[in-house]
């Protein structure tokens, strides 16, 4: 069953490997490459808000450089292990619950089926594309993986009757989950609900038998929460804060945000049942309540009432219903965040919902069997057909959604289609157009943003890049210097500033900005080459060669033959100017071999022949012709 689950997962999610870096991947990963590869990378990661997640970024940077495919492999592997952990967790819990039922004659076999189907339904759901195909959101997957493992340790503690022994791995796993993402504070109450409602059926017995295990989980969560309040600004009133977490984000108060989240409940349910309206970013609806608020309130009250009733009567489903609410609270209505509705919040909460669905279907089979129907072809076939249809539709939708993540421009065009006034969508869509070199297409979006939001710094950066492409360096500098006052370390801004200063003949200033880029993104071969040219123009050939060789090392084995050809050509020219004839001839030969066109190859020919002749003359001691 585990092998089938792994195989189906790899088949469904293989499209995620072709995804590109999107949205926060650029400032968090691509623009932090220098820090991730630097000597203080580990200590810097350990001091971050999400140290465990940051450490995985450092590891990926060392293993895969800035190749998105390698980073997406890591996301996929984490998701795969999460599915396996959920499979084993549900299987053991289902086996325990079914063994207590008189209606089930083969609890182990049915529990295996329940665990497998639950993990399969959860793992192939297309709503998870925002976690699996969006690198930065692996924090959700890591927190869920460690959470599933902590819950599994609780089950093993129950089975073996060794609470103190299993408290140690639970402590480590909860700590790792909190280090992955703060939303893991839900683990302490989830552990208690699982023990109370599924394992023991009694709150008193759960606490009495496994108090050390629950104690370490609650101490960690409470200590972490206090730390976040004191040092990470969860209670800071900062109305101007556009993104992040806290009661003052975008001027929200707790009540306003809570009501907005109640309105989001029908949206979340719709995305789970019919995931055809998936978006990487959604319109900000905080404070603008609609008719969906009342259904959201009624649904939540009804869900809590049924869950509490089931828990009080010792029903497993009561605890699972409450676990679903607990799982979504920390990153949703409990702590206000900048976005009202985001799909990655449903990564962990979808697990208990899948348990309820599959457990309910298993209950239907047992109920029909008790009423005289043997578990024959009719009920089993109907349930199997229902599940096959759901899994198939989910897998097809997941594969289609992964194609969107392979082209970030499509993601942002979808957001613009849903909300034509979205500033963030316009910014990110224009940024994607600029990365593709489509400056004229990006210009209208940038102008519209600056007309309505003249203080938007990213819009000023994008405007500067476009104006540079239109050969207007003076106007570009005006926009870029506005952004420079705040975005002191933004690589794309410094690259544009360097290009503008070089165009105006300010070589020393251009050198400063290009070095700032390389400091943050040492694998930026294009900037290495431009910096080498700036140094060459200043007559500093030896320093120029250093950056030319760095660019060649980055580009060799890659797909950008045009840039590699330029790097080899420039390196040969530097050697030629220093009269290192043999060295120049070698680089010119390589440049000819990598030339994309015959015309470029022919253009190098005279230089290669001259360097070869002079190298031969030098070796034979013949008089050189300076002319």
Image (cartoon, helix red, strand yellow):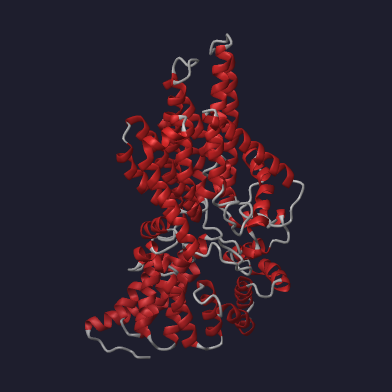
**Residue sitting nearer the eye, 323 or 51:** 323
Side of 24 relative to 585 (left or right): right
Residue 538 appears in which quarter of the rendering? bottom left
At 45% across and 66% down in the image, what residue appears?
32
Where residue 458 appears, x then y in whole percent?
Answer: 60, 71
Q: Is residue 184 above or below residue 44?
A: above
Extreme bottom residue here?
627
Q: Tell me, yes or no, if residue 253 can be seen here.
A: yes
Q: Tell me, yes or no, if residue 153 can be seen here.
A: no
**Residue sitting nearer the eye, 500 or 418:** 418
Residue 497 appears in which quarter of the rendering? bottom right
| Quarter of the rendering occupied by the N terminus | top left
Where residue 612 appears, x then y in whole percent?
Answer: 32, 77
Where residue 544 appears, x then y in whole percent?
Answer: 38, 81
Q: Is residue 388 above or below residue 56?
A: above
Where residue 265 appears, x then y in whole percent?
Answer: 66, 44
At 48% across and 54% down in the image, what residue appears?
182
Q: Is residue 619 above or below residue 550?
A: below
**Residue sitting nearer the eye, 586 or 606:** 586
Extreme top residue here?
372
At 33% across and 32% down in the image, what residue appears?
161
Extreme left residue here?
620
Residue 452 appears in which quarter of the rendering? bottom right
């Amino acid at each position: 069953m585990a092998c089938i689950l792994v195989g189906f997962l790899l088949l469904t999610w293989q499209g995620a490997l072709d995804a590109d870096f999107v949205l926060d991947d650029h400032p968090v990963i691509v623009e932090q490459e220098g820090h991730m590869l630097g000597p203080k990378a580990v200590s810097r990661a350990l001091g971050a808000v999400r140290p465990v997640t940051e450490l995985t970024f450092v590891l990926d940077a060392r293993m895969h450089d800035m190749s998105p495919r390698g980073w997406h492999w890591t996301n996929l592997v984490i998701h795969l292990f999460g599915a396996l952990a959920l499979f084993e967790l549900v299987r053991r819990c289902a086996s325990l619950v079914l063994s207590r039922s008189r209606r089930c004659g083969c609890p182990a076999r049915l529990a295996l089926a329940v665990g497998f189907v639950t993990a399969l339904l959860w793992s192939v759901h297309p709503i998870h594309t925002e976690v699996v195909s969006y690198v930065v959101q692996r924090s959700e997957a890591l927190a869920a993986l460690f959470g599933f493992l902590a819950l599994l340790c609780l089950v093993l503690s129950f089975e073996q009757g060794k609470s103190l022994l299993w408290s140690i791995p639970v402590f480590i796993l909860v700590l790792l989950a909190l280090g992955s993402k703060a939303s893991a504070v839900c683990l302490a109450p989830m552990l208690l609900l699982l023990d109370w409602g599924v394992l023991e059926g009694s709150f008193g017995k759960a606490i009495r038998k496994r108090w050390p295990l629950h104690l370490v989980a609650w101490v960690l969560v409470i200590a972490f929460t206090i730390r976040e309040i004191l040092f990470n600004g969860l209670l800071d009133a900062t109305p101007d804060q556009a993104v992040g977490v806290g009661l003052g984000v975008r001027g929200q108060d707790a009540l306003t945000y809570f009501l907005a989240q109640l309105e989001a409940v029908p949206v979340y349910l719709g995305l789970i049942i019919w995931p055809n309206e998936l978006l990487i970013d959604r319109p900000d609806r905080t404070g603008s309540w609609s008719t969906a608020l009342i259904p959201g309130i009624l649904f939540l009250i009804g869900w809590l009432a049924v869950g509490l009733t089931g828990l009080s009567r010792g029903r497993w489903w009561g605890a699972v219903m409450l676990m679903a609410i607990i799982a979504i609270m920390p990153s949703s209505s409990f702590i206000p965040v900048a976005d009202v509705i985001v799909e990655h919040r449903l990564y962990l909460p979808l697990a208990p919902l899948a348990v309820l669905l599959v457990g309910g279907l298993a209950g239907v089979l047992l109920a029909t069997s008790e009423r005289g129907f043997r578990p024959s072809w009719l009920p089993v076939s109907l349930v199997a057909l229902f599940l096959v249809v759901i899994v198939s539709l989910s897998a097809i939708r997941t594969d289609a959604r992964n194609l969107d993540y392979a082209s970030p421009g499509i993601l942002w065009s979808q957001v613009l289609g849903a909300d034509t006034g979205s500033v963030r969508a316009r910014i990110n869509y224009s940024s994607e157009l600029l990365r593709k070199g489509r400056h004229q297409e990006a210009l209208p979006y940038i102008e519209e943003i600056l007309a309505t939001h003249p203080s938007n710094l990213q819009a000023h950066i994008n405007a500067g890049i476009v104006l540079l492409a239109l050969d207007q360096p003076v106007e570009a500098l005006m926009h870029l210097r506005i952004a420079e006052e705040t975005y002191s370390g933004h690589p794309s801004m410094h690259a544009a500033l360097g290009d503008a200063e070089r165009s105006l003949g300010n070589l020393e200033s251009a050198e400063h900005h290009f070095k700032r880029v390389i400091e943050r993104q040492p694998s930026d071969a294009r900037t290495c080459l431009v910096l080498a040219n700036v140094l060459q123009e200043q007559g500093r050939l030896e320093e120029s060669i250093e950056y030319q060789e760095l660019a060649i090392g980055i580009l060799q084995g890659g797909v950008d033959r045009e840039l590699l050809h330029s790097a080899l050509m420039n390196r040969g020219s530097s050697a030629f100017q220093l009269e290192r004839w043999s060295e120049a001839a070698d680089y010119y030969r390589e440049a000819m071999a990598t030339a994309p066109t015959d015309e470029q190859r022919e253009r190098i020919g005279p230089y290669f022949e001259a360097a070869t002749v002079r190298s031969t003359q030098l070796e034979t001691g013949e008089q050189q012709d300076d002319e």
